[in-house]
Image (spheres, rainbow, N blue to C red):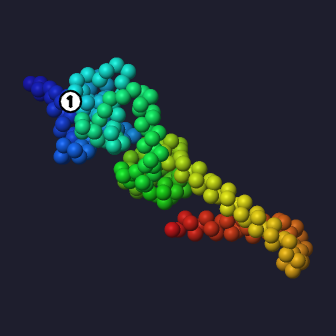
Amino acid sequence: MARPRVSLEQRFWEKVDKRGPDDCWEWQGVKVYGYGQIRGDTVMLYAHRVSWELANGPIPEDKCVLHLYDNRSCVNPRHLWIGTKADNTHDMVQKCRSARGERNGISKLTEQDVHEIRQMLSCGISQRVIAKKYGVDKATISLINTGETWGWLKEKEEKRSRDGIVADEREMKMLLVKPDLHQRLKVLAAKEGTTIQALVAEVILRLLVERGAKGGRR
């Protein structure tokens, strides 16, 4: 005898952590990039869109269901609103500017975590292993890897690195104009069979490597 078919609405609410009327209702089922998903008759549906339709009826054509508090897994109808694609883009940009990275209340990762994740990725460690270590899904690691999320931090780190190199080059030039030190470097460079600039550059490179190693151990 065939089992009675369970309605979409029943299956939907079975996967919701329903709390107070003004709290976020977290989706407990499948998530993709943080958005809840549930199987419809033939395709996968976004949980927040299903929630809106169950509470308010069909979504107007060419409209988007947006999250009021930028919690992608929330399906509380009170935390959802209807907007255009332009509203969606504007909303995303504004939230990114005002609460990016670890300052975002729903972020599980810190800047240090992301720095470590990038180092692990560069060493060839699989995204699945890294995701398990930090308690996030593989999609989160993939987005960090491509720079789609936390991209601003990568730019910040690269700028810090460039600034450090410029400062070190400036320091090297200052050292070279000191008469006593210049003479000692000249003698040492002659013994090593190299130039003063190459000798100082090698020392600076070693300092940069040591600085990077210390930063990785924090």
- Residue bearing the label numbered 1: 55
Number of numbered discs visible in the structure rendering: 1
Residue 80, by quadrant, is top left
Give me the residue at 84% from left, 71% from top.
Answer: 176
Q: Position of residue 124 (x, y in %)?
A: 54, 52
Task: List x then y, in percent, for residue 19.
Answer: 18, 46
Up the image or down, 67 lies above or below 129; here it is above
Residue under the image location 45 percent in, 35 percent down: 90
- Looking at the rendered structure, the secondary structure element under dot 1 is helix
The spot of residue 174 in percent (x, y) is 80, 70
Query: Residue 21 versus residue 197: which sits nearer the camera?
Result: 21
159 sits to left or right of 14: right
Front residue (pair 208, 60): 60
Image vertical order of residue 114 relative to residue 177, above or below: above
Q: Which amino acid, by three-letter code, is at mark 1? A: Ala
Which image quadrant is residue 193 in? bottom right
In which quarter of the view is residue 63 placed? Answer: top left
Residue 189 position, x and y percent, is 87, 73
Task: Report the residue that reaches farthest toward the left.
Answer: 1
Q: Tell me if residue 164 comes above or below residue 140 in the rendering.
A: below
Q: Quadrant of the N terminus?
A: top left
What residue is rendered at 59% in x and 50% in y?
155
Q: Is residue 142 visible?
A: no
Dot 1 alpha-carbon crowd within 10 angstroms: few under 14, some 14 to 19, many 20 or more: few
- In the picture, measured across the screen, residue 59 lies left or right of residue 162, that is left
Q: Is residue 10 left or right of residue 179?
A: left
